[in-house]
Amino acid sequence: MIQALRGMKDLLSPNSQRYIYFVENCSRIAKNYGYEYIETPILEETALFKRSVGESSDIVGKEMYQFIDKGNNDVCMRPEGTAGVVRAFIQQKFDRAGVKKKFFYHGPMFRYERPQKGRLREFHQFGVESFNQANIKEDATIILMLKEMLDFFGIGYKLELNSLGCSECMPKYKEKLVNFLQDEDDICDDCKRRRDTNPIRVLDCKVKSCQEIYQDAPLLLDNLCSTCRDDFTQLKSILDKFDVKYTINPKLVRGLDYYNKTAFEFVSDEIGAQSAIAGGGRYDKLVEYLDGKPTSGIGFAMGIERLIDLIVMSETAREGYYIGALCDEASDLCFELAINMRKTKKVNLEYNKKSLKAHLKNADKQNARYCVCVGEDELAKDLVWVKDLQNKEEKSITANELLG
Ligand code: HAM
């Protein structure tokens, strides 16, 4: 029997209903904040992710679904959404026009990771990206919007916050950190590689002995330039004002290389080891890295699979009609009724004749509001039998009344 690939899942009810509920409500909230829907291709040139997410990242280094297509192009299934949106922004020449743009998106992402609970090879993100808003108030707004989304679904979280500095202070800090790492021969091989490629990535190494060494490492937050420091202070005070709780994590660097200044992660302690439910931050150099005109950017993405179990959804009310024939002679009438009623109503039709009891049971299982049955008695009187499964009322009415 052919099965879905490892780390890839079918989405069926009730999770598919939760998925739609999640995406619809996040979209509604994003629109209130001025975001518009964007859809970019799942397949992109591999170079796009190498240049944005970064060669030193695990995503590009180990996890890409990369192949050569029939036209000899080096392509890759997107491991995340930001790079494609930035490419589209530049391709549409929005960078040259200097316009402010806000996009939201949702869809599948692919990372060849070792699957475990909450970690899939195909997973879905809901994300947003905002361009040309260099103001720190935009950073606060994006965090407030994400909080509003999680609050709407009744999802508890902790927010971790850091500032990675800008092109003025980050290089100086990196130099300090490399000096610190120079004499540390006991760090793991991954960290030795990171020391040469993107040294700040050592800070979130999961190896315990490395973490012990980094306890004495210089911290980004102590090395920010005055602009970054003032912005970070302002960001914290806006979050305080709006009662957003956060903890400062000076070692939060995120797993993608394009970030600068604000970096944040929302984590949950209700979903096991893979606790990050959303992550994001600023990427003011990314448009330039991808050959666009300098344009600031900021965004975040949520992992929908990690959130779906946490969504508190009210029980769905009974809805629509179930129609079934009680004898063979009534089945054509039931078929016609269903086709006509579907122009305005939700209708589930049972093609096979069944007993009244069996139809009522089916209607109940399908969460229908009304069960409509037609048998010999009804045919003789030109009527149909209807039961309201909510208030249990039964009546016989004409087909026209039902259609009305
Ligand atoms: P990310 O932190 O790599 O950021 O992913 C965002 C979220 O996607 C994570 O917090 C997690 O919930 C979910 N996620 C990641 N990998 C997996 C996986 N293998 N299985 C299930 N869920 C997963 C980004 O992707 C950035 N593009 C976010 C961003 C947007 N930054 C700025 N704009």
Image: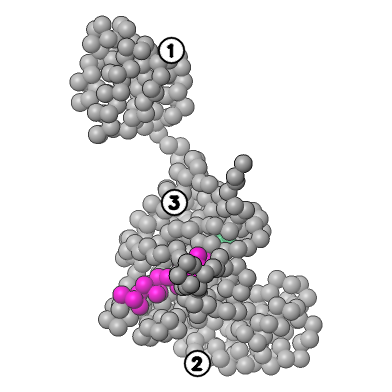
Q: Which mark is residue 301?
A: none
Inter-mark Cα distance, 1 to 2: 78 Å
Instruction: In the rendered view, tell whether residue 354 sits above or below residue 370.
Output: above
For the residue marked with disc 1, what is the amino acid?
Answer: Ser
Q: Quadrant of residue 206?
A: bottom right
Indicate the position of residue 75 as horizontal and vertical percent values.
Answer: 49, 70
Q: Quadrant of residue 372?
A: top left
Q: Which mark is residue 22?
A: 3
Indicate the position of residue 153 as horizontal and vertical percent values.
Answer: 47, 51
Q: Nearer the viewer, residue 339 or 358?
A: 339
For residue 123, side relative to residue 199 (left or right): left
Please give the name of the residue rendered at 32% of the width and 33% of the height, measured from the top-left corner: 346
Q: Is residue 325 magenta?
A: no
Please give the name of the residue rendered at 60% of the width and 45% of the height, measured from the top-left corner: 2
Indicate the position of residue 241 as horizontal and vertical percent values.
Answer: 44, 69
- The residue that mark 2 highlights is 168
Instruction: Please say whether residue 271 is visible from this viewpoint.
Output: no
Inter-mark Cα distance, 3 to 1: 39 Å
Answer with mark 1 or mark 2, whichever residue precedes in sequence. 2
Which mark's residue is nearer the viewer, 3 or 1?
1
- The residue that mark 1 highlights is 355
Inter-mark Cα distance, 3 to 2: 40 Å
What segment is highlighted magenta in the picture?
Answer: 75-92
Indicate the position of residue 360 as horizontal and vertical percent values.
Answer: 43, 19
**Quarter holding the N terminus?**
top right
Q: Nearer the viewer, residue 303 or 229?
A: 303
Which mark's residue is nearer the viewer, 1 or 2?
1
**Quarter holding the C terminus?**
top left
Instruction: Please say whether residue 20 is visible from this viewpoint.
Output: yes
